[in-house]
Image (tube, rainbow, N blue to C red):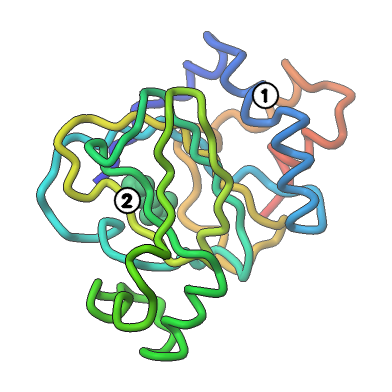
Amino acid sequence: MPINLLETDDLFEHRALIDLAVHDDILAAVTAYLGQVPRLYNVMFWWSPPSQTLTGSQRYHYDHRDTRQAKVFINLSDVTEENGPLHFLKPADSLKVDAKVGYSQGRYTDEEVYGAVSKSDVLTAVGEAGRGFIVDTARCLHYGSRGNRSDRFILLLNFARVNSVDPGKGCVVLDPVRKRLVREFYDSDPVRAVVLDSPL
Ligand SMILES: O=C(O)CCC(=O)C(=O)O
């Protein structure tokens, strides 16, 4: 299971981290997909240590923050099948699974998934350090950190609409400093003020 290594102070000691999270290119893509300026709900550095368990997010599931969300996965180290990459299905293939076994807010077994789609339909977020993916984890069945034999390190950004259906449990890294980030780094930047500090 992924473990977050990012701490609030890191955002101020390494401003490039938050500049990357709210970079124009990322905001443009996510805004186009969601149809509105998004809110950044979560930012984390995920460490997935070697693991042979099959639990939680290591099993196929959807996320439920809203009917759409955009998760950005950026590889911080090279990621191969050895590192437990994110595995995901396209929305159309995910719908085939729902049609066969029913939509669930719980977890799906591999047997359920591969009874509806072929293993060759599965996409993986593999690639060298620096490669990134934006995946709608509300519409794409997915799992990760499964069966890895070596560590995986990724930067994870979780965007969804302002006033999403389920704002979740909050973000330990961002929540204490949302206003401070806007004040110190993005004063007079109304777009990033929405992204970082729109009320729930
Ligand atoms: O990549 C992973 O370890 C799991 C990702 C996942 O399930 C999620 O972000 O919801």
- Whole-number angstrom distance, CA of label 1 to CA of label 2: 30 Å
Asked if the residue under mark 2 is in contact with the one under mark 1, i.e. CB atoms within 8 Å, the reply is: no
Furthest residue in direction left, as rendered: 52
Indicate the position of residue 21 as horizontal and vertical percent values: 62, 30
Residue 54 sits in quarter: bottom left
Q: Residue at x 41, y 30 (%)?
A: 45
Residue 117 sits in quarter: bottom left
Q: Amino acid at mark 1?
A: Leu
Could you classify mark 1 by the number of other residues whose Cα lies within 10 Å: few (under 14), some (14-19), or many (20 or more)?
many
Mark 2 CB near ligand 1 (8 Å cut): yes
Indicate the position of residue 34 as horizontal and vertical percent values: 74, 57
Residue marked by disc 1: 181
Q: Which mark is residue 144?
A: 2
Q: Residue at x 45, y 84 (%)?
A: 98
Element carrying mark 1: helix
Q: Which mark is residue 125?
A: none
Q: Amino acid at mark 2?
A: Gly
Q: Residue at x 44, y 23 (%)?
A: 129
